Amino acid sequence: PAFQSCVSHGIVLGNDGMKMSKSLRNYPDVREVFDRDGADAMRWFLMSSPILRGGNLIVTEEHIRGGVRQALIPLWNSWYFFSLYANAAGYEATWSTESTDQLDRYILAKLGDYVRGSEQAQDVYDIAKACDLTRDFLELLTNWYIRRNRDRFWAADGTVSESTRMGFDTLFTVLETVCRVAAPLLPLVTEEVWRGLTGERSVHLSDWPDADLFPTDAKLVEAMDRVQSVCSTVSALRKAQGLRVRQPLGGLTLVTPSADLVAGLSSIVRDELNVKEVTVVDVDQAADTDFGIVQRLTVNARAAGPRLGRDVQQAIKGSKSGDWSVAEDGTVTSGGITLQEGEYALETVVDDRAGGDGPGDGTQLTAVLPGGGFVVLDATVTPELAREGLARDLVRAVQQARKDAGLEVSDRISLTVTGSEAVLDATIAHRDLIVAETLATQFGSSGSIDDLPAGDGVTEATVGADERVRIKLARI
């Protein structure tokens, strides 16, 4: 043959949908894009686009900046987070895959999959797929691994615990490996990050990583992926009901397949969803328990019609009226007619008659999980939980005030907070939480917001449902 590989692409269109043309100037000024977003942004935009799959591509500034948000910023923020906390702890991380922490082993296993997948894609010039894999892995790294591990990277009083050490080494390993894999896609950003990590000459002179060096744990990956699905479902449930993320709730019942695997990760579910207790139940053992979840039978008329003839209408009527049953041997009968496998679908769903808020007094929320199972969230907010939620919101407001004041992550502060009596009660009940999270060595609070006059150095914020507070802090 005349060639070994052939890459076909579509047509590059301008921002008006017409073919890109110098005479029409229907495209963003490349020099402005380079100055504002960088050359890697344009490179990523082109390589991750449909054009490398034979589709057409419309070039707009918005789409170019989308690539910055999807890949460049997550990678750079991960590197910034690592360098910030490693420098604050005075710890020099090393390349290691020996951690026994579950989240570390999970991200390392996913890293091995990423290396294999990207190598296969790049070997056959499927650059768009390699970009998809990179984007998905960076999303997992930033919005799951780093976010769930943030507290581990804080070395209190400069003491690096074994857990913190493993966390630093794992994150170093992940970032160093990602830079080598993504270097053909993001050559400038990966060069900057990799040289900052290793101090060596160039990522483009390094070897491709060996995927076999990373641990494999199929059961852990399956369970952790399931946990992420659970957290996504419950977070959407909380959002739909207007329950703030920082508002603790009493408990969550998780009914799922492979309950024994998921139960070992229940602490991650508890922390991620901000609930006090997580109960994991195998879906088979929960069949007779009333969680506001029901089974629904749907008759497939197209599949059952040829065999049943006009009787299929009777079976459909039975499925809708509730005149159906499942025998101990699994035989399904609807409207007095026995159905065969493939003629029906049996689903576990939320009972519509529960009014959308679950059973009982409306304080339990239910949702079906993708892949089977369901969750029941106790949405009761007791006065104690309300005070804790207010305190956690206050911590977030103080952290923002620290950031606005330009403080370093390790700076100690004096802190004064004023607000309503509810704010005062929260600061008294959860003083230790506020002091520990904000690094306040001196702390005072008042139940009258005007005890701290508005002015220079005083920050105003809204916490809880609608509680105004004033915050004053100073570096010590």
Image: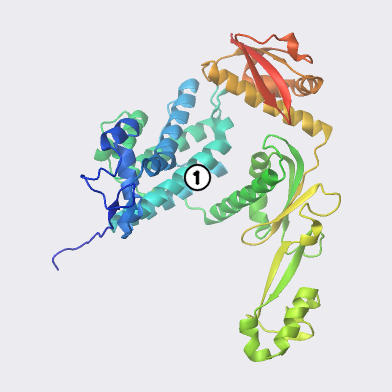
**Residue 418, placed above or below residue 271:** above
Name which residue lies at 29% across and 30% down: 200
Question: On the rendered structure, is 363 left or right of 191?
Answer: right
Q: Is residue 307 left or right of residue 293?
A: left
Question: Residue lying furthest front in this view?
Answer: 24
Horizontal side of 36 relative to 215 (left or right) equals left
**Which residue is outermost to the left?**
2
The residue lying furthest to the right in this view is 361
Which amino acid, mark 1? Answer: Leu
Seen in the picture, residue 106 relative to 84 is either above or below; the reply is: below
Task: Tell me if I can see residue 327 in this picture.
Answer: no
Dividing the picture into quarters, in which one does residue 191 lie? top left
According to the picture, the residue beneath numbered tag 1 turns out to be 140
Residue 347 locus on image (x, y percent): 69, 68
Picture quarter with the N terminus: bottom left
Crowding near the residue tagged with mark 1, few <14, some 14–19, many ≥20 C-alpha atoms within 10 Å:
some
Q: Is mark 1 on a helix, strand or loop?
A: helix
How many tags in the picture?
1
Q: Position of residue 43 (x, y in %)?
A: 30, 43
Q: In which quarter of the image is residue 153?
A: top right
Q: Quadrant of residue 471?
A: top right
Query: Could you say which is closer to the camera, residue 61 or residue 379?
Result: 61
Residue at (70, 19) in percent of width and height: 469
Considering the image in quadrants, where does the C terminus appear? top right
**At x 86% / y 52%, what residue is drawn?**
360
The answer, for residue 288, to whether it is visible in the render is yes
